[in-house]
Amino acid sequence: MKGKWKNNLDEMQEQEMLHIEKNCFWLLYVMLAAAMIVQLAVTGEHRMVAGEFVCFMVVSVIMVAQCLRHGIWDRHLKPDGRTNLFVSIIAGAGAVLAQALIFYWKLSPAAAGISAVITFVITFVLCLTAMTFLTNFVKKKKQKLEKEDEDDD
């Protein structure tokens, strides 16, 4: 099947196409997350976003798995504790924001505040734990891939 589809792009066009696809992927990813949050805020029904959630999670798991498989962390961020802490704080704040948008009018101010703190702490701890595990995994995978490259030479 590979031989059937000829690539008609030169190297510069191929790089530009990859750039366009990357931008479109991340735009779609963020818009899908925003659509789920808005639907939950408006309807309050979790089953209304089940299809979008499944698609979002499948893409997320595939992205993480493929990056781990190839020993890739990020184009701009380093796999270290400082990055993990920063990303975990952002994730906790994002979870609180999403929860505020969804449950804003359903909770009293005191319950909303307590819920926000609990949500932040749980999200922060889970994200930091997962990021630390993934950081170590990527570092080991990268070392293994570099060692294989040295052995091939």
Image (cartoon, rainbow, N blue to C red):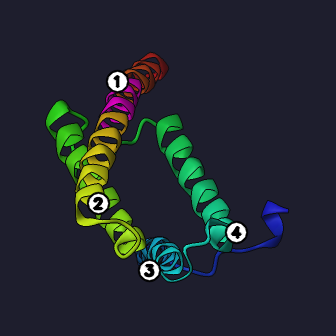
In the picture of the structure, the residue carrying the numbered disc 2 is 112
Q: Residue 57: give x, y in percent of width and height.
A: 59, 55
Q: Main secondary structure of the magenta part?
A: helix
Q: Residues within 10 Å of mark 4 (few under 14, many from 20)?
A: few
**Residues at circles 3 and 4 in contact by the CB criterion of under 8 Å:** no
3D distance between C-alphas at marks 1 and 2: 36 Å
Magenta residues, as a range? 128-137
Q: Of the residues under marks 2 and 4, which one precedes in the sequence?
A: 4
Q: Secondary structure at mark 3?
A: helix
3D distance between C-alphas at marks 4 and 1: 33 Å
Residue projecting furthest to the left: 82
Q: Secondary structure at mark 1?
A: helix
Q: Is residue 88 above or below residue 25?
A: above
Q: Dividing the image into 4 quarters, which one contains the N terminus? A: bottom right
Kind of residue sitting beneath label 4? Gly
Q: Is residue 21 above or below residue 110?
A: below
In the picture of the structure, the residue carrying the numbered disc 3 is 20
Foreground pick, 20 / 88: 88
3D distance between C-alphas at marks 2 and 3: 41 Å
* Side of 125 where 50 appears, left or right: right
Foreground pick, 68 / 122: 122
* Residue at the image point whose x is 42% and y is 71% from the top: 102
Q: Residues within 10 Å of mark 3 (few under 14, many from 20)?
A: few
Q: Of the residues under marks 3 and 4, which one precedes in the sequence?
A: 3
Q: Of the residues under marks 2 and 3, which one precedes in the sequence?
A: 3
3D distance between C-alphas at marks 3 and 4: 26 Å
- Mark 3 or 4, closer to the camera: 4
**Residues at circles 4 and 1 in contact by the CB criterion of under 8 Å:** no
